[in-house]
Amino acid sequence: MSERILIVEDEAKLARFVELELLHEGYEVDKSPDGRDGLNKMESGAYDLVLLDIMLPGLNGLEVLRRARRTVDTPVIMLTARDSVMDKVTGLDMGAEDYITKPFEIEELLARIRAALRKAQRRQPASHVLTAGALALDVDRYTAAYDGQPIELTHREFDLLRTLMENEGIVMSRSALVERVWGYDYMGETNIVDVYVRYLRGKIDDAYGVKLLHTVRGVGYVLRV
Ligand code: CA
């Protein structure tokens, strides 16, 4: 599958030129001529990389980057004017991957794009599926299965199971589980954990005749195969 690149640039000729070069390299390309539209597109999370001009109508590129970083971590290469050292520094501080100064050689831009994509690839764990015996949890798709059979879990059940699986073999106290699954500001009783472990046992241990969820008396729970 080819990688998708978004070009946020108001200079139509430059945007078109870069678009053609990227298409030629086999990337999928979208263009956006202003900051607000660019931000909306970025927030869709549909892109592997964004080329972001700084001087844009609507919202400037730095503001687009600042807002986009609340929700997405798509690598961004800033397109900056020659003299704007502040823009470069600010852009990098705000989480841009790299910048390139206009006017640029297309070969240099392509090299920077390849480098940024490689780096982003390395950041991603190879697999987002946790397993314990025949139990599998796909943390991207929010699905669970035992021996290939789908298990219906609520959001909380999923989060609790995920925490236990990430800590397989490690005894987790009730308060540690509450903190991770319900959050620091949860004000209720820690026996909420017992209730949810019971739900999970019903759906996994009892349903498949196995024993994965173990009680450690006086302490908490451990998932062990
Ligand atoms: Ca511009």
Image (cartoon, rainbow, N blue to C red):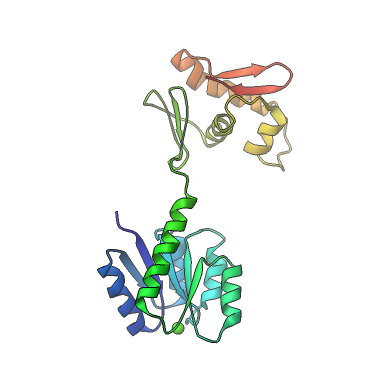
Q: Is residue 179 positioned above or below 68 on the image?
A: above
Q: In the shown orientation, is residue 185 left or right of residue 120?
A: right
Q: Position of residue 49 (x, y in %)?
A: 42, 63
Residue 194 or 20: which is nearer the viewer? Answer: 20
In the image, 65: left or right of 112?
right
Q: Quadrant of ligand 1?
A: bottom left
Residue 117 visible in image: yes
Percent from the top left, x then y, of residue 59?
52, 77
Q: Residue 41: in sight, yes or no?
A: no
Q: Residue at x 64, y 17 (%)?
A: 215
> What residue is rendered at 57% in x and 69% in y?
92
Spot occupied by residue 80 in the image (x, y as percentages of width and height): 49, 80
Q: Is residue 63 above or below residue 207?
A: below
**x and y percent of residue 56 in the render?**
47, 81
Q: Nearer the viewer, residue 41 or 74?
A: 74
Question: Farthest residue toward the bottom?
Answer: 83
Q: In which quadrant of the rendered view does residue 85 lie?
A: bottom right
The residue at 39%/68% (across/down) is 111
Position of residue 138 relative to residue 14, above or below, is: above
Identify the residue at horizontal 35%, vertical 82% (top origin): 14
Side of 10 where 225 appears, left or right: right
* Residue closest to the far top: 209
